[in-house]
Amino acid sequence: MRKRRTAACFMAAAMVMGSLAGCGQKAAPETTAAQTSEAKKEETAAAEETKAEAESTGEQVELKVFGFKTGAEEGAIPELIEQFNKENPDIKVVYEGISNAGGYQDVLTARLASGQGDDVFFANPNYLPQLQEAGYTEDLSDMPVVEKYSGLVKDLLTINDSIPGLGMEVAVFGMFSNLDVLKEAGIDHAPANYKEFLEDCEILKKAGKTPVVAGAKDGTGVAILSLAKSMDPVYQASDKMDQIAKMNSGELKFGDVMQPGFALVEDLISKGYLDGSKALVYAAGQDDIAEFAKGGAGFMPGGSWFVAGLESAAPDMNYTLGGIPVEDDDSLILINAGVRVCINSSSEKKDAARKFVEFFTGLDSMNAYVASQNSFNPRTDGASTNNDVVEPAAERLSAARMVPWVDSAFDIAVVSPWADARTFTANVAGGDSVDNAVKDLNAQVENNLKLK
């Protein structure tokens, strides 16, 4: 802009000098054609230089993205952001990550509530309905990826007839088995049911091994066990929607529904197969992975995204991720259309945000992301992981032996299965009785109904 102002001043000065010359006794020298041509060239060059300067100093949109994927769990996220930034020089995406165990949800909520929320953010599915109700999310039903989701995924993503967040993966919770540790103890395969699981844990305990490592600082590691046990009968029932409706109304007490899961965790702890106190100081996806990677434990409840951390911490470990062996006849997995990508309704950069989210949920991006997370693709035209480690979990998915750990059919203002399971199963791990956990959970639901 300085050059443009200087040129204008020069032209004004020339006009003044021309006027003064007209008033003098001598006329100004006549401008030749060559001089005119040269002046035009200089003017054109100055204009081009001014344009180039304006373009080079043009404002670049900085798009802030906030997520709970950190460290090894980031997977392909950095590469995808780098690719997007390269292809869109007018937009610069900056990603910040805080793990769930590190307080992601609290930080996210505080930022949004204060009006300082990031343009794009990842949402944990169990908290997303609350974020939507508070008005923090854009409806993304019109995004191109939606028509590529399966019916099941669309159902899981739809909340109050809109889609506040786009699913990046079908995430799976299952049970990791260290096959080398099992073999060393004389066990030739991962347990297929609860009876085998208990037998294997006893063998490992007698062999001086740790039967089960769990990260339950936020309740996750133990809730995987309790929720699978308690909610499987609900989802296998022909009247599951009626049962869920009754839980929402309080007619069917959720604490009573969760009782079998609480009792299972208490049983594992009382038998010495699971150290509840240690579990409560282990962050899920971090401390439990570090402990399991040491090679002294047989089993670890965890998510498919843990594989990246295990590959880094113990590249030579021989292990699998299979079903959670909490039933007498078989095992099952917990699933969710996990990592919901949302656009902040208060963002002043929604066009750029939509452009990034469309790229991030595109076929190539989703394939790369899913592969890096060792998870399953929510797009019907997408490719899921082909990692042999998760093949047993994939078999459970194909067999439809699964339970969603977050389901929008629940009124989370009353009953939030995943959050409640984490809180009250952690209480059991900390020494609370099953009866007290059931009683306290029922009381919480009753209070929620009164406050609604």
Image: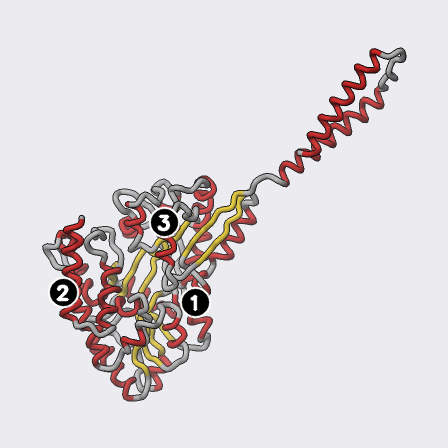
Measuring 30% from the left and 77% from the top, which residue is drawn there?
212
Residue to which mark 3 is pinned: 166
Measuring 28% from the left and 51% from the top, which residue is drawn there?
156
Residue to which mark 2 is pinned: 439
Say if residue 41 shows up in the picture: yes
What separation in Å lies between label 3 and label 2 (alpha carbons)?
A: 36 Å
Q: Secondary structure at mark 2?
A: helix
Q: Quadrant of residue 56?
A: top right
Q: Is residue 120 above or below residue 422?
A: above
| Amino acid marked by disc 2 | Lys
Which tag, 1 or 3, sits closer to the chain's start?
3
The residue closer to the viewer here, 300 or 385, is 300
Q: Which mark is residue 308?
A: 1
Q: Secondary structure at mark 1?
A: helix
Q: Is residue 138 above or below residue 287?
A: above
Q: Is residue 85 above or below residue 280?
A: above
Which tag, 3 or 2, sits closer to the chain's start?
3
- Report whether 44 appears left or right of 399: right
Crowding around mark 1 (Cα neighbors within 10 Å: few <14, some 14 to 19, many 20+) is many
Which tag, 1 or 2, sits closer to the chain's start?
1
- Report whether 281 appears left or right of 316: left
What separation in Å lies between label 1 and label 3 (alpha carbons)?
A: 23 Å
| Amino acid marked by disc 3 | Leu
